[in-house]
Image: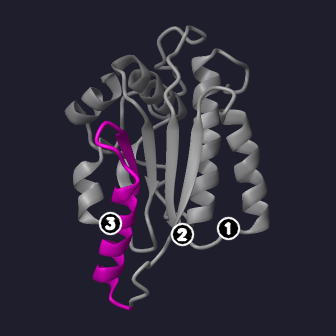
Amino acid sequence: MEVLMRARTTNPHLLPGADSGKSNVRCPGQSVRSVPMRIISVSKKRSQGVQLLVEEYEEKIRLYCNMDILQLKSNPKNTRDVKAQIEGEDALVFQNIRPEDMVIMLDERGLDMGSTDLAELVRDAGERGSSRLVFCIGGSYGHGPQLRARANVTIKLSSMVLNHQIALIVLLEQLYRAWTILKGQKYHH
């Protein structure tokens, strides 16, 4: 997969073309294999305003691919021990990932990807025959060791730490933007 190969051979924090304004997407508007997507978010209940935005972007993205969003309960063991909380959340996330999934972990220390890089990642996943793209947004204390070991790639949405609801909205908007880039539609400038 081209994006993953570049990520392994270049600066681990910045992919070529990221933030350069140049499109890295080969042949926008060409046929792209639609890969189902799942977003797994470990968090508390969403506010009504956030839920409205989530539903709006889900509807838009479903024009291009099947998608589902799983919201998993943070701190499933109801413990004050941070390590136990991370392990409990890690186990819950892992139960919702299949062996053949391509797993993208969101983490503030991940690769800095521009919108066109994300579009290329989505396209490459389809070309390589991935069964599903799974994006993981961790709990308050981040991801556990199982998910870190399993993730195919780790990306960041921002150098700043984002609250889970904001991270979900930003991810959804960028996935919608990725599809419009791939289809050559006039949304991304």
Q: Residue at x 52, y 15 (%)?
A: 32
Marks 1 and 3 sit apart, C-alpha to C-alpha, by 22 Å
- Is 101 magenta? The answer is yes
Residue 90 in the image: state x and y as whole percent.
33, 66
Say few, some or many: other residues with alpha carbon within 10 Å of mark 1 (under 14 / 14 to 19 / 20 or more). Answer: few
First reached walking from the N terminus: tag 2 or tag 3: 2
Highlighted magenta segment, given as a residue range: 80-107
What separation in Å lies between label 2 and label 1 (alpha carbons)? 8 Å
Secondary structure found at label 3: helix
Q: Amino acid at mark 3?
A: Ala
Whether tag 2 and tag 3 are in contact, CB under 8 A, the answer is no
Q: Closer to the N terminus: mark 1 or mark 3?
A: 1
The residue identified by callout 1 is 46
Which residue is rendered at x = 65% and y = 24% of the image?
Answer: 180
Quadrant (top left/top right/bottom left/bottom right) for the N terminus = top left
Nearer to the camera, 133 or 137? 133
Counting other residues with Cα less than 10 Å from the Cα at mark 2, is it few (<14), some (14-19), or many (20 or more)? some
Q: Are marks 2 and 1 in contact (CB under 8 Å)?
A: yes
Residue 124 placement (x, y as % from top left): 40, 22
Q: Is residue 103 magenta?
A: yes
Three-letter amino acid code of the residue under disc 2: Ser
Q: Which residue is mark 3?
A: 91
Q: Quadrant of residue 89?
A: bottom left
